[in-house]
Amino acid sequence: MRSVSELSRRFQGPRVVLRPIDPDADAEPLFEAGRDAAIWDYLPYGPYVDAEELRGVLREQTASEDPIFYVVEVDGTPLGIVSYLRITPEHGVIEIGHVWFGTPLQRTAAATEAIYLLARHVFDDLRWRRLEWKTNALNAASRRAAERFGFTYEGTFRKHQIVKGQNRDTAWFSIVDDEWPQVRRGFEEWLAAENFDENGAQRRTLEQCRR
């Protein structure tokens, strides 16, 4: 297993680029992408009153080494944020979290590709053992996303945290290295150009491709 220093700081696929945050350049487009207040319901921060407030948070995130934050960029436009966190190289364990996709990114192939690129790096490049996804147990959209991506539900930690003054029960999900070949095959078949018709509609779901 490789060390945390070998975590990539940039990923690129056919549809999406994940790269380090540039607070000065990224604050305005990210603020525009994240105007829907519902995006922030289950995150420990946001929504923001203006781009300048978001820029301050982005500066803090840029300085962080755990989590490591990435801008999700499509066609040159920053549309969201993802991160690696709880990085534990001695056990080969890492989590994807602090995920927020702006309205134009939600439910797109680019969003799925972003998660695939992060997962592929963990298992194929680093040869780590376990990738985690944790979410507020009330966050039905995040739970559905985890299962769609191929994560397995492991249980709920009750009264795990207090977020924005509210109790948070945390639902835990994971993919382990034994499962990754099947999960990877599903991602790759779903993301293939031939899985989409001339209007961009999927021919098979990600779950169908994985099966």
Image: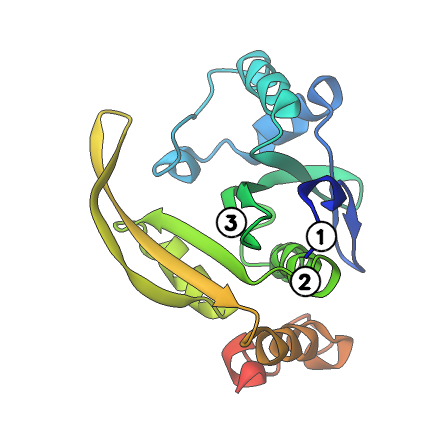
Residue type at numbered disc 2: Arg
At numbered mark 2, what does the secondary structure look like: helix, strand or loop? loop
Which disc number belongs to residue 151?
none
Work out how far the residue at label 2 is from the one at label 1, CA to CA, in angstroms.
7 Å
Q: Where is residue 125 in the image (x, y as percent from the top left)?
A: 75, 60
Q: Where is residue 162 in the image (x, y as percent from the top left)?
A: 25, 30
At numbered mark 1, what does the secondary structure look like: helix, strand or loop? loop
Q: Earlier in the sequence, mark 3 or mark 2?
A: 3
Work out how far the residue at label 1 is from the one at label 3, CA to CA, in angstroms.
16 Å
Q: Residues within 10 Å of mark 3 (few under 14, many from 20)?
A: many
Residue type at numbered disc 1: Arg
Residue type at numbered disc 3: Glu
Work out how far the residue at label 3 is from the one at label 2, CA to CA, in angstroms.
14 Å
Instruction: Look at 52% across and 58% down and name the residue there.
Output: 131
- For disc 2, the marked residue is 127
Residue 202 visible in the shown view? no
- For disc 3, the marked residue is 95
- Residue 52 sits in quarter: top right
Q: Say above or below: 4 vs 211.
A: above
- For disc 1, the marked residue is 2
Instruction: Look at 38% across and 29% down and name the residue there.
Output: 44
Q: Which of marks 1 and 3 is in front?
A: 1
- Residue 156 sits in quarter: bottom left
| Residue sitting nearer the eye, 22 or 199 | 22
- Count how many numbered circles sit on residues in the image: 3
